[in-house]
Amino acid sequence: MTVEVRPAHGFPDVAAVLGPKKNPDASVCWCLSHRVDSATNKSLVGRARGEYVEELCRRKVPPGVLAYEDGAVAGWAGIAPRAGLPVARSTKIDAVDDLPVWNIFCVRVQPGFRGRGISHALVAGAVDLARSQGAPAVEAIPVDNKGAKVDLTMAFVGTRALFESAGFTKVADTRSVSGGFPRVVMRLPLS
């Protein structure tokens, strides 16, 4: 098994991970719920969601990274500067300080590729992307599930253990809960 992580500039591969599997008009997340403000998120319905992500993929700085296992698209991690994300305005997740950190807000591994270390490769690739853009640190706000099983629909935020294994440390608690578990702020300094 060979895993490679690349910046997500190829829209067809992003669509393979994030897009609707059966109905192209379905208003699935497309990893926009935690990237854009609430009004924009609600205004993007059906195919407009994919079109928005396609435009993001054409930008100089991609909207995230993709993992490939032996050439097949295996997963996705969304990352961007925290200041431009809804989390920057959250009433339940306070900023730790004014450092212009980047935030990994979604880690998704395709069915059939889970349990093979893809999420670890995605986190490392997202960190590399942020580093290449001059980020001073990367944060994530995963669940602190203490090893308990996390419902896959809520697992996109990752787990504390995943980020600890990548060298992140807990820097703050939050008032946010996902899938019944508290979320914590994890940080990896890059400078």
Image: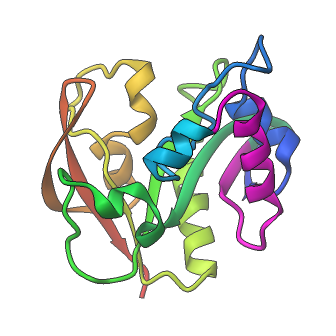
Residue found at x 33% / y 64%: 88
- Residue in view at x 42 percent, y 67 percent: 82
Tag count: 0
> Is the residue 133 above or below the residue 138 in the image?
below
- Could you tell me if residue 160 is visible in this image? yes
Q: Where does the N terminus fall, quadrant-wise?
A: top right
In the picture, measured across the screen, residue 57 lies left or right of residue 186, that is: right
Q: Is residue 160 magenta?
A: no
Could you say which is closer to the camera, residue 36 or residue 57? 36
Q: Is 169 rendered above or below residue 175? A: below
Q: Quadrant of the C terminus?
A: bottom left
In the rendered view, would you say 108 is above or below 90? above
Residue sitting at x 71%, y 63%: 62
Residue 90 falls in which quadrant of the image? bottom left
Residue 154: x and y in percent read: 38, 27
Looking at the image, the residue that sits furthest to the top is 22
Query: Which stretch is magenta?
Result: 44-67
Residue 132 at what x, y percent from top left?
A: 63, 80
Regarding residue 117, the answer to whether it shows in the image is no
Report the front residue among 115 and 35: 35
The answer to whether residue 14 is above or below residue 7 is above
Residue 43, quarter of picture: top right
Residue 7 position within the rendered picture, expressed as x and y whole percent measured from the top left = 74, 60
Point 43% across, 20% down: residue? 152
By what rule are the colours in the image chosen? rainbow
Residue 63 on the magenta span: yes
Taking 156 as reference, is 181 left or right? Answer: left
Q: Residue 118 at what x, y percent from top left?
A: 59, 39
